[in-house]
Image (cartoon, helix red, strand yellow):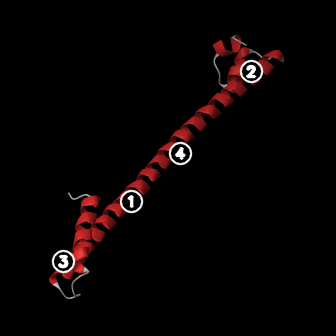
């Protein structure tokens, strides 16, 4: 595969020849064809690079959102659990039995006894 620098050197050499010849000459036609191939090739590469960047960005964004959503759900679960324990403590202080607290809050007896 020819590098961008090699293309540019080739085009520069062909341009030097082509600029000294009439527009209908073989050298001018060769230069124009080479220039067209160069532009087509690098437009294709640039388009593929941009497409890859866009697709990679979209994939990264989707993965980040999914991970963030999982973290948010876990934080809310922990927050809800702490609220249950806080409520259980208040219920116990008000004289409710462990069985009543278990029934209302759906937490284990061990958790209530730790309060």
Q: Residue 99 is drawn in which quadrant?
A: top right
- In the image, 81: left or right of 31? right
Name the residue tied to disc 4. 65
Mark pair 1, 4: CA separation: 21 Å
Q: Which is in the foreground here, disc 1 or disc 3?
A: 3
Q: Which is in the foreground here, disc 1 or disc 4?
A: 1
- In the image, 16: left or right of 49? left
Mark pair 2, 3: CA separation: 86 Å
Identified at 50% across, 48% down, the residue is 61
Q: Which is in the foreground here, disc 4 or disc 2?
A: 4
In this view, 103 is above or below 115: below
CB-based contact (under 8 Å), mark 2 and mark 3: no
Callout 1 crowding tier (Cα within 10 Å): few <14, some 14–19, many ≥20? few
Per the image, label 2 sits on a secondary structure element best described as helix
In this view, 88 is above or below 80: above
Q: Residue furthest right?
A: 94
Answer with mark 2 or mark 1, whichever residue precedes in sequence: 1
Answer with mark 1 or mark 4, whichever residue precedes in sequence: 1
Identified at 32% across, 61% down, the residue is 45
Name the residue tied to disc 2. 88
Name the residue tied to disc 3. 30
Q: Which is in the foreground here, disc 2 or disc 1?
A: 1
CB-based contact (under 8 Å), mark 3 and mark 4: no
- Residue nearer the viewer, 52 or 105: 52
Mark pair 3, 4: CA separation: 52 Å
CB-based contact (under 8 Å), mark 1 and mark 4: no
Per the image, label 4 sits on a secondary structure element best described as helix
Name the residue tied to disc 1. 51
């Amino acid at each position: 595969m020819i590098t961008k620098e090699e293309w540019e050197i080739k085009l520069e050499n062909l341009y030097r020849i082509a600029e000294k010849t009439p527009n209908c000459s073989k050298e001018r036609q060769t230069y124009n064809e080479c220039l067209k191939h160069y532009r087509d090739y690098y437009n294709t590469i640039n388009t593929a690079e941009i497409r890859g960047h866009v697709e990679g960005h979209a994939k990264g964004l989707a993965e980040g959102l999914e991970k963030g959503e999982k973290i948010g759900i876990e934080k809310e679960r922990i927050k809800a659990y702490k609220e249950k324990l806080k409520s259980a403590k208040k219920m116990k202080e008000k004289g409710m039995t462990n069985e009543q607290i278990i029934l209302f809050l759906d937490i284990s007896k061990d958790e209530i006894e730790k309060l």
